[in-house]
Image (cartoon, helix red, strand yellow):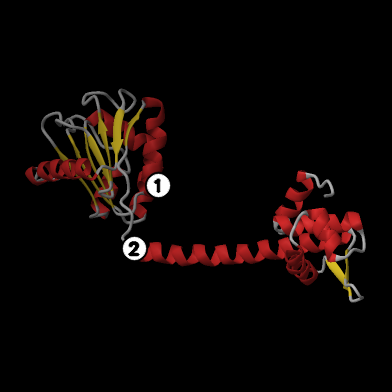
Amino acid sequence: MLLIEDEDLKTLNCLGLTGRQARVYLVLLRLGLSKAEAISKASIIHRQEIYRIIAGLQEMGLVEIKVNTPTLFSAIPIEEALIILVQRKTKELSEIRGKTKILAEKFCRIDLQATPPVEESYFSIISESDRGRKFRHALENVHETMDIVTIWKTFRQGFTLFDDSLKKALQKGITLRVITEKPESETFPKWVIPALTKKSIFKIKAISNTPPAIVTIFDNTEVSIAVNVTADFTGGPHLWSNCRNLVALSRAYFDCLWMQLEDPA
């Protein structure tokens, strides 16, 4: 038996040869032109099996057969063999990539036809430092409705800080409704009155007392709730969530207040 290193066998295995094919090929490299009997003895593989293995190696182009009496076999040089095996492996991997793409597309289509996944609810505490960025992002992405219950000082601050974003949101055609306890001595920001008179989609109603909860509802999908009811826009954290139950409770709260306040502010 010739000494064949395991690492060499593993390399050929990775390139697509079976363990016995790799052993026979490496034995042939060492022996040179040989009879089946010699190959069988050196590789410790039964002679009848040798013929089957060599037929497979010949089909790959790794072994040459000389029809003599007896028949002789030889391995092509290792450099040529490796090129052949690498090319075979590359082709195989290319075919696998094509099949995986088809498989992925097939199951993507199935997923699209299946029941849409339920979006997971999230609850986030938004700090004072992040609130401005969060509200501005929400304003830029609101599509249909925005309903607000707030105190006057927060209303003044918010409509000043987000003046441009609010006007752009109204230009997109969103419905904006606000409930706030505006003092009689106070006035609205300059652009609010013209917007109220020109756009039926923008309405404000006044509440006589401080609202029991400060909420903002975006597209009936997300809600922001002030943790501290009396804090101004820069004071105290807000709870932000897309939880359906919490949004529904906030919606019922806003609608109840809105129906009670018949006259616009």
Q: Which mark is residue 140?
A: 1
Residue 69 picture location, percent across and down = 91, 75
Q: Crowdedness of circle 2 by 10 Å Cα count: few (<14), some, many (20+)?
A: few
Q: Residue at x 83, y 60 (%)?
A: 39
Q: Nearer the viewer, residue 201 or 133?
A: 133
Quick one: SS at disc 2? loop
Q: Nearer the viewer, residue 39 or 203?
A: 39
Q: Residue at x 26, y 39 (%)?
A: 216
Q: Quadrant of the C terminus?
A: top left
| Residue 106 can be seen in this image | yes
| Image-quadrant location for residue 248 | top left
Residue 157 picture location, percent across and down = 32, 31
| Image-quadrant location for residue 67 | bottom right
| Location of residue 132 with respect to 11 vertically, above or below | above
| Left/right of residue 17 with respect to residue 169 in the rendered view | right
| Left/right of residue 78 with respect to residue 173 in the rendered view | right
Quick one: SS at disc 1? helix
| Image-quadrant location for residue 211 | top left
Q: Crowdedness of circle 1 by 10 Å Cα count: few (<14), some, many (20+)?
A: few
Residue 133 picture location, percent across and down = 42, 35
| Left/right of residue 113 with respect to residue 247 in the rendered view | right
Q: Nearer the viewer, residue 149 or 248?
A: 248
| Mark 2 vs mark 1, CA separation in Å | 31 Å
| Residue 265 can be seen in this image | no
Decide which of tag 2 and tag 1 comes sooner along the chain. 2
Residue matched to label 2: 114
| Left/right of residue 20 with respect to residue 198 in the rendered view | right
- Disc 2 marks which amino acid? Ala
- Disc 1 marks which amino acid? Glu
Residue 25 picture location, percent across and down = 81, 59
Q: Residue at x 77, y 61 (%)?
A: 85
